[in-house]
Amino acid sequence: MSDPHQVAQYAIGDAKLVRGEGVRSWDSDGREYLDCVSGTFNLILGHNHPEVMAAVREQTESLVFASSSFQTEPTNVVMQELVKISPANLTRVNLRSSGGSTANEGAIKIAQLQTGKRDVIVPFRGQVGQSMAATSFNGSSRMRAPFPYQFPGVTHVPDAYCYRCFYAQKPDSCAKLCVDRIADFITYSSSGSVACVLIEPISGVGGNIVPPPGYFEDLKAFCEERDIVLIFDENQTSFGRTGEMFAADHFGVQPHMMTVSKGLTGSGLPLAAILTEERMANFDRSLHGFTYGGHTLSSAAAVKTLEIVQRPGFLENVRASGKVLKDRLLDLQKDNPVIGDVRGVGLMLGVELVEPDGGKATKKTHEFQRALHERGAITRVSEHGLGNVIELRPPLVLSPEDAHLIADRFGEALEAVS
């Protein structure tokens, strides 16, 4: 067999994973890892959840795939359950996307059709996706810089990053300039024809940034005053990640539209959905559809996943394990000035590493991530590996005992790189 490093078009690690179970995975040398990022933030029920795997095996015996021109039992149930658990104003489901990028693009199309306007507002550091249009809309120049052709019609605005506030405000005296000043960006940086604001309620790739209380209430009011559709990109924050079913529930705000993918199937099969208000139900199906959108087999996995996350005690476990992990990280921060900030809710946490002068300790962050990997903890670094925030998104089935174990390994890694 040829060396994978010689045939891949991208960098890959040396470890070869061969098995996964729950919050753990093992490589070909038999080494055990704690998966602190749920695969790619998508294995919310962990590796190979037995009930999900059983549902998939059962579905393979009858029907693996059907054209979206037909109904199937799994796709019908997925749509019904999504409406049941989503914010009450979201009553329609478009299940014709195959991932978060295409769901976000579909949401933009729907907003443009609904409003008759064209521009998209995305916060700094916002991760819209990896398709060509989504890449053009991403809130980081690094993602756009290599490509000579860019889709027009996006305006980037400062995010609600309180730890490094663009407007040099403090949370206790903040005037919510990160909402109010959007009006200036619309006037001077956009075409003036704004269809939607597309925002992750808690940024994923951008560094686990949690907006302050009241931010989303103000943002929704701002949008409604201007006939702008507010879209929550909940591809990372949905189905219990924040300790509530959706981040919208955590913040107590109903967006006009919501996109979900990643955790929808629990254990790694691709599926995405766009949830909208009833007024947006006139979107022609021919305008947005993909071969593997609404995949029957993936939908069977999603049906079981949505059943599991609604069971009594599931969200309570997320909140309990998340509290254990966050409290332990905050304790480590007291004795380790390299930890500038610990932030997040539920099991969506970020640890920002800083230099003595408060600058971003990017090099130290990568040393720390390597030390964690050596101690059997798989993590990710913000901004696709170029940032200074360690991202933690363990499976939502994480026990408080394993939360302590993750924190123990954090402590050991901090000692190693101090």
Image: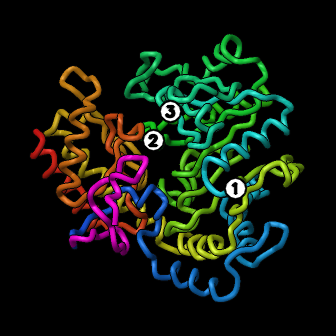
Q: Is residue 372 above or below residue 57?
A: above
| Residue stretch rendered in magenta on the structure | 1-29
Q: Which residue is mark 3?
A: 143
**Residue nearest the observer in this picture, 121 or 175:** 121
Left or right: residue 35 compared with residue 306: left
User: Residue visible at 15% across and 45% down?
Assistant: 414
Left or right: residue 60 compared with residue 402: right
Where residue 260 sits, quadrant-wise, is bottom right
The N terminus - image quarter = bottom left
| Alpha carbon distance from label 3 to label 2 | 12 Å
- For the residue labelled by badge 1, is the local secondary structure a helix, a strand or a loop? strand
- For the residue labelled by badge 3, is the local secondary structure a helix, a strand or a loop? helix
Is residue 159 visible in the rendered structure shown here? no
Q: Which residue is mark 1?
A: 97
Foreground label between 3 and 2: 3
Where residue 251 sits, quadrant-wise, is top right
Q: Residues within 10 Å of mark 3 (few under 14, many from 20)?
A: some
Q: How is the image coloured?
A: rainbow
* Coordinates of residue 184 in the picture (x, y in percent): 65, 13
User: Residue visible at 56% across and 72% down?
Assistant: 305
Is residue 179 visible in the rendered structure shown here? yes
- For the residue labelled by badge 2, is the local secondary structure a helix, a strand or a loop? loop
Q: Which residue is mark 2?
A: 205
* Coordinates of residue 51 in the picture (x, y in percent): 51, 82
Q: Of label 3 and label 2, which has the lower sequence position?
A: 3
Amino acid type at image mark 1: Ser
